Amino acid sequence: MKSDVLELLVYLFEHYMDDDGDHLPDEEGLRDELQQAGFRLQDIRKAFAWLGDLADRPEGLGTTATASALRHYDETELTRLDPECRGFLLFLEQNGVLNPVSRERVIDRLMALEGDLISLEHVKWVVLLVLFSEPGEEAAFAWMHELVYDSEPAGDFLH
């Protein structure tokens, strides 16, 4: 999945997920609407698979991590997530926006995006999508939503 898929995910979020969801079409209708919006069928399928994997909560993903644990990145993660991206993830975790489990879900979904380098903007959007999908993370989602849309979150979420 290239940035085209992430652009499609952002489009889905802005048009369907970030509201009350009353007018969400079925999958076939949504696929047709996305094609009419100019997205390729291949990218639509990949985006649906990405979202399906996000909805699946794999057992054991990050469940053994504690708040004091230090995250070691493997070689592929180090290559694709530059120091700015890794630092941002650490910042979010140290300030309670992400917990160890949500951090691992974010990294998992970032690595599922095809391509070489992942930008800070990609990280912000994936964090937002992961927090949106997590029950009980409304405050963290709201803070991240402000950061993504306004570049300066309103209020002080940080502990």
Image (cartoon, grey):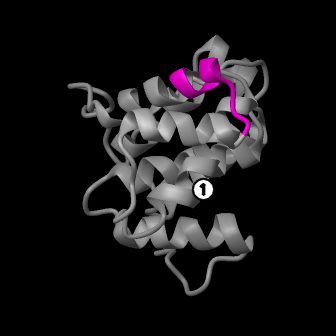
Q: Position of residue 44 (x, y in %)?
A: 57, 28
Q: Residue at coordinates 52% horizontally, 22% vertically from top-left?
A: 45
Residue 60 visible in image: yes
Q: Where is residue 72 in the image (x, y as percent from the top left)?
A: 53, 26
What segment carries the magenta color? 38-45
Q: In which quarter of the image is residue 117?
A: top right
State how many labels appear.
1
Q: Is residue 62 left or right of residue 72?
A: left
Q: In this view, does 14 lie to the left or right of 119?
A: left
Q: Is residue 133 left or right of residue 148?
A: left
Q: Position of residue 29 (x, y in %)?
A: 44, 40
90 or 122: which is nearer to us? 122
Q: Quadrant of residue 66?
A: top left
Element under disc 1: helix
Q: Position of residue 112 (x, y in %)?
A: 55, 22
Q: Residue at coordinates 69% horizontally, 33% vertically from top-left?
A: 39
Q: Residue at coordinates 74% horizontally, 19% vertically from top-left?
A: 115
Q: Name the residue under label 1.
A: 91
Q: Residue at coordinates 66% horizontally, 39% vertically from top-left?
A: 36
